[in-house]
Amino acid sequence: MDPKVRFLGVSQFVSRQRLQILLPQIHVSGDRVTEGELQKAVPDKIDQLFCDILRGAAEQIHIHVDDNIFPKRKSTGTADELIVQYEPLAFVLSDPVTRQHLGGRVEGEDGKDAWGTTHRWKKGDHAAIPYITPENVVCPDVTEWQKYCKKPNTLFPEEDWKQAEEDAEKIRQEGTHLVSVLMATGLFEQLHFLMGFEDTLLNFIMEPDSVHELLDYIMEYRMSMAEELIRHIKPDVVLSHDDWGAKDRLFMDPDTYREFFKDRYEKLYRHIKEIGREVGKDIIVIHHADSHCAEIIDDMADMHIDIWQGALPSNDIPALQRHLMGKKPYLMGGIDAGIVDNPFATEEEVRQEVQRAIHDSEGLPGFIPCITYGLPESIRPGIFEMISEETEKYNQSKK
């Protein structure tokens, strides 16, 4: 099975029920769907690979689809198969840009990243977190950001890319996974890494012009970072991180989000897709935000986000699925890390949470059950694997 076709199939239930949900406007006359009916029914933001899945669904219940509407698809395997978390993705993290960006984080120590932000990693903790005080804050005055902020280098000698290029080629040769790269610390996160969380939110109101200037500067770094990753590694997937909210709300009102971030993300993700096409790749953009973002779900589609990873259950995922009806962004998450990855959760509670997430979205399009963390991991050993195992059990039950 082509891993990209499988991933963009995103656990769609290829069945009569699924086709009726996805294409409710179609009136089937005999065994034929007309070109006009399909063009009317298929949402304009569904890409060619997803149309490929729709074609397969139609053919499975013996509805003929003309070749000039959708090209014939490759086999996509078992009809009711769910994607198992991050299973289709293989990450390349050995490149110089990523190593630099994630540097300065050592367990048991305070360290500084490439922008100068201090990170504290307590002994025994899972990871480092920003440790920002009045004494060590990088940018104490956003109106003078040019004085304090210096973006890291993204241009490295070709020799420094050799290991990452070899790692990517090995994944491609194996042919079972999508070559994936990580772009951590998005625009909002970079702002509060530089200024502190409270000051960032205050500066949206008090100093909006300076915040816009600083965001443009950060954008230069992100655009160059993306281009270097894509030209050297030629990934199938870019996973970009930026948490935009808490468990039950955005960190800012939707209009503030749109003012400062929407257009910039539309530009960044469009750039990623354009550079991808230049190197022969139709890149899948996955945006990680383990947050409440339901109010901006339509904005995500405008920003060229293919998959929203980290979608918390508090977003009412089935309601979002019914709203999107197979249009992007597809939703990846739904398994509450607060339930499954806390020290008191029993194995039964973990498995029940996975079953709940699958059951709630069954028969609806565009969902990948997954822990809401932004990488394939869990804090408690074995929890991530338990989620995958329970998803596989569901898949086996449908065969």
Image (cartoon, helix red, strand yellow):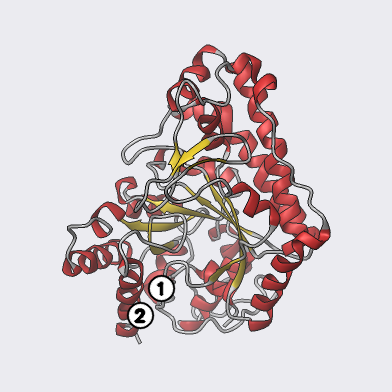
* Pointers 1 and 2 in contact (C-beta within 8 Å): yes
Specify whether residue 336 is in view: no
> Mark 2, residues whose alpha carbon is within 10 Å: few (<14), some, or many (≥20)?
some
Measure the C-alpha gap from mark 1 to mark 2: 6 Å
Is residue 224 left or right of 82 when viewed as pictured? right
Amino acid type for the residue under numbered disc 1: Leu
Between disc 1 and disc 2, whose residue precedes? 1
> Mark 1, residues whose alpha carbon is within 10 Å: few (<14), some, or many (≥20)?
many
Quarter of the rendering occupied by the N terminus: bottom right
Give me the disc on residue 60. Answer: none
Say which residue appears at 46% left-offset and 44% top-offset: 109
Q: Quadrant of residue 333?
A: bottom left
Q: Is residue 255 above or below residue 348?
A: above
**SS for callout 1:** loop
Amino acid type for the residue under numbered disc 2: Asn
Specify whether residue 260 is in view: yes
**SS for callout 2:** helix
Q: Report the residue that reaches farthest toward the front.
A: 109
* Residue that label 2 marks: 395
Q: Report the residue that reaches farthest toward the top.
A: 206
Residue 167: percent from left, percent from top: 67, 72
Q: Is residue 273 above or below residue 213?
A: below
User: Which one is nearer the viewer's eye here, 34 or 213?
Assistant: 213
Say which residue appears at 58% left-offset and 23% top-offset: 139
Residue 366: percent from left, percent from top: 45, 61
* Residue that label 1 marks: 82
